[in-house]
Amino acid sequence: STQVETREFQAEARQLLQLMVHSIYSDKDVFLRELISNASDALDKLRLESFADKDLDVDLSDLHIELVADPQERTLTIRDNGIGMSRDEVVNLIGTIAKSGTAELLGKLREAKESTDAAGVQELIGQFGIGFYSAFMVADTVTVLTRKAGETTATRWESSGEGSYTIATEDTAPQGTAVTLHLKPADAEDRLFDYTQVSTIRGIVQRYSDFISHPIRMEVERTKDEETVREVETLNSMKALWARPRGEVSDAEYHEFYKHISHDWADPLETIRLSAEGTFEYQALLFIPSRAPFDLFTRDAKHGVQLYVKRVFIMEDCASLMPEYLRFVKGVVDAQDLSLNVSREILQQDRQIQLMQRRLAKKVLATVKSWLDSDAEADAEKYRSFWSEFGTAVKEGLVTDADNRDAILGIASFESTKAEGQTTLRDYLERMPDDQEHIYYLTGRSRAVAENSPHMEAFRDKGWEVLILTDPVDEMWVDAAGEFDGKKFQSIAKGEVNVDKDADKDLEQQREEEFSGLLGWLGEQLAEQVKQVRLSARLTTSPACIVGDEHDLTPQLIRMYQAMGQ
Ligand code: ADP
Ligand code: MG
């Protein structure tokens, strides 16, 4: 090999490694799940890459993962013949954490750690998707030897997880990646087991990685006719969960599968299965995560549903399978009647795929609705947690998915003057007095600002509930939403709001005349700033307020457009 170079980990990566090395995570067995998950991804990537690049000359006939334990040397190697990594990729993928929002998340992590909130730390750590670093929970030193498909030289990377790593170029190595762990001494008290024992490894693979679609092989010793023979065993069943009868798959199995495809470390909030028979046959296994990813609102936020065709993995991040506003849903769709070399472009135009997307979206929305309709406190809690994590994204659907607008309004919650937390529209309507005509709302930057708005005064006096819409996205849908259950959405800051229908017309007339001088003078003074100055019945304590025309942009929308540079 050539000269060995020593490099520093990026600051964020170093901090995360520290946490891993000093093992905040109680279940250390998961390191194997993570390394197998990476190996499986690498095998899938090799297959996809060889289809995309016809010049890439690779052998796809025996894609597999191999585990090699050496009890004398106390090493465990996880080897795959997948895509491998170039030298630059090793530096960028293993030595740095490039995700946006990393610094912020690290801040939270430090806080949780200082308050010794172990559960909080584990949950946050899971959000980084730093599976590879979990190797340092069980190993003093980790060595990676990898050769990328199509390249002739290989890369050796080594680190003890303490701030720096070494990297060197090697002349030869098999294509793919071998990760070798130099194991820490077993320590039952610390739940650090002997990961050179076949029985330990077999148990972990069966618990966490049984569904992995490539064989995970290991050489084992068996006694046959009083003689010890060595033979290769495949540790996993490779069975697709969505193809097994529903009653046969345990929650734990679903959860491990979810963690593999999502790179999340926490259990999902909900598992959803769905299948269609007939002319276009498919099975879907979907998951609603328990937490929003921290890049949910970034431009490169990824979709989470993978496409399989007849059990064969075709593509990840398949945007055609889920509408944009449900991009956080993870899972797998296995279609029987598509070609194995179907492209993203074809999917986008395929009528059957569009129908499937609609069905999947409706199923997700119906699942959320079922929590609302349920009497169980656990379901109510699921709903609250769902809405606080994903509500802002789901509301985008009120703008983009006219078909499901009612369904989305049916599961939405908003702040309101009469709810301590948030209220559904159903509950709002139930509280609505007979003489109230519309669903009233006010948009604003925060609840506090909205509550202090002079627009609120008359409504407070009347006892009419006002929804307080504080998300920027609310501005985008609420005008177009029209109505819910026959009741119109009406802004209390726009146009003439008729709080008092039976107001005395004569008295109004009389007041108009009485104040006409003042109104005229104010109108002249403020001619540059306002269109009109008029008497209002909507104020009770404030002397004046500014209202928009029925079709004006609100101040929030104006700010939003300005922020977008328009
Ligand atoms: P994640 O899997 O969530 O991306 P990891 O920390 O597990 O995060 O892995 C980081 C990256 O390193 C992977 O995305 C992949 O690009 C690369 N990588 C890790 N293991 C392998 C492997 N066995 N073969 C090829 N690339 C790998
Ligand atoms: Mg990983």
Image (cartoon, rainbow, N blue to C red):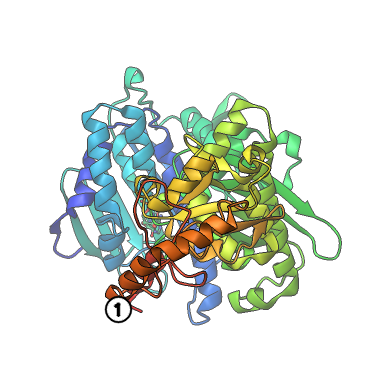
| Residue 471: image location, x then y, percent | 43, 55
Residue occupied by mark 1: 528
Q: Quadrant of residue 497?
A: bottom right
Q: Residue furthest right?
A: 278
Q: Position of residue 301 (x, y in %)?
A: 44, 62
Residue depicted at 53% across the width and 81% down the height = 54
Compare residues 178 and 366 and report the one nearer the observer: 366
Q: Residues within 10 Å of mark 1 (few under 14, many from 20)?
A: few
Q: Quadrant of the C terminus?
A: bottom left
Foreground: 243 or 32? Answer: 243
Position of residue 291 relative to residue 379, above or below, is below
Q: Position of residue 252 (x, y in %)?
A: 58, 33
Given residues 505 and 413, the one toward you in this image is: 505
- Residue at the image point whose x is 54% and y is 69% from the top: 48
Left or right of 140 in this view: 148 = right
What amino acid type should be assigned to the residue bearing mark 1? Glu
